Image: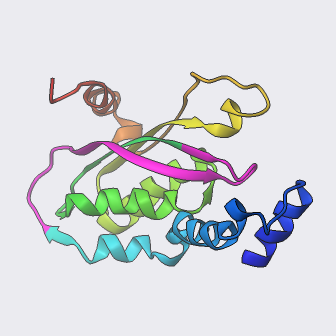
Amino acid sequence: MEDLIRELLGLIGEDPRREGLVKTPERVAHAWEELTAGYRVDADALVREALFASDGKEMVLVNDIDFFSVCEHHLLPFFGKAHVAYIPNGKIVGLSKIARVVEAFARRLQMQERMTQQIAECLHRNLAADGVAVVLHAQHLCMMMRGIQKQNSFAVTSEMLGAFRNNAKTRGEFLTLIQEKAWN
């Protein structure tokens, strides 16, 4: 990868031997290793390893999970907040694992729409939950820095499974809760 970055620097008109750029290929390779770490994470295993029996039947919500990802179309970052809820059906998962699932899918080349669906399906599949809801709010640098260049636009995607798709009241409760701020 370092050789590719040196070549890229030359192709855009830079001198990869210039003092400020000498270590850039190494730094970029390291950065891409971090940005794509999700390819080396088994999100299903993350959930399965942290399941606990529970009689609870009410919604579990983890709100405002920060994430950073990379748009697969332009290789530019997008970032925002994930809101994830599920309705238990005999099992619950450690709360931090929900954030880790978001991270596992965010740290890949992504489209926000697919990432939303992957998070929901992973949790639904492994929890056998009565329902799973995921909403992502994100800003995309590919829209902010190039093309249309709209600085204040947000993309919002949702995936509703089970009770969140089939029951308007449950869906409404989730959508209300993700707009509330618990720590005013």
Front one among 80 and 45: 80
Quarter of the image holding residue 119? bottom left
Question: Could you tell me if residue 52 is visible in this image?
Answer: yes
* 78 or 84: nearer the viewer: 78
Q: Residue furthest front?
A: 19
Image x and y of residue 34, in percent: 51, 68
Residue 121 magenta-drawn? no
Residue 27, picture quadrant: bottom right
Q: Position of residue 61 (x, y in %)?
A: 24, 44
Residue at image position (52%, 62%) is: 107
Span colored in magenta: 53-78
Is 65 contained in the magenta span?
A: yes
Residue drawn 31% across the image and 70% down it: 47
Q: Residue at x 41, y 39 (%)?
A: 165
The picture places residue 75, in percent across and down from the top left corner, at 70, 53
**In the image, 183: left or right of 10?**
left
Residue at point 37% right, 60% down? Answer: 123
- The x and y percentages for residue 59 are 20, 43
Q: Is residue 173 above or below residue 75?
A: above
With respect to residue 151, does 115 lie above or below?
below
